[in-house]
Image (cartoon, rainbow, N blue to C red):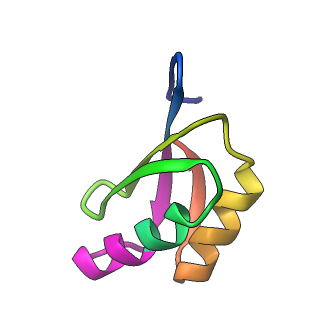
Amino acid sequence: MSAQTDTPASVTTVYQVTGMSCGHCEGSVSGEISQIPGVTSVKAVASSGEVTVVSEAPLDDEAVRAAVDEAGFELAGKA
């Protein structure tokens, strides 16, 4: 189950992250994912657990998982 929208210069992917409960959590996850090469935008929403990532090309799921782990949360998969 994947939520990807492709445009000529970007790919939008929605991930499900468990454990986020506040704005600080959102910032931690967004900050780590934004460091992945090619990422142009990250929006994390703690209430739904969804993290929307816009990138120049499809991202390696393991790179996203490592970034989420570094922030102290768990990547449950793509929304």
Give the number of callouts.
Answer: 0
The quarter of the displayed image where residue 64 is located: bottom right
Q: Is residue 8 above or below residue 72?
A: above
Is 1 one of the magenta-colored residues?
no
Q: Is residue 63 left or right of residue 56?
A: right
Residue 16, position in %: x, y? 48, 52
Residue at position x 53%, y 80% in the image: 71
Residue at position x 72%, y 60% in the image: 63
Residue 58, position in %: x, y? 67, 35
Is 21 one of the magenta-colored residues?
yes
Residue at position x 53%, y 76% in the image: 73
Q: Is residue 8 left or right of residue 66?
A: left
Q: Quadrant of the N terminus?
A: top right
Q: Is residue 17 above or below residue 59?
A: below
Residue at position x 44%, y 72% in the image: 31
Q: Is residue 50 left or right of residue 79?
A: left
The front one of 5 and 41 is 41
* Magenta highlight range: 14-28
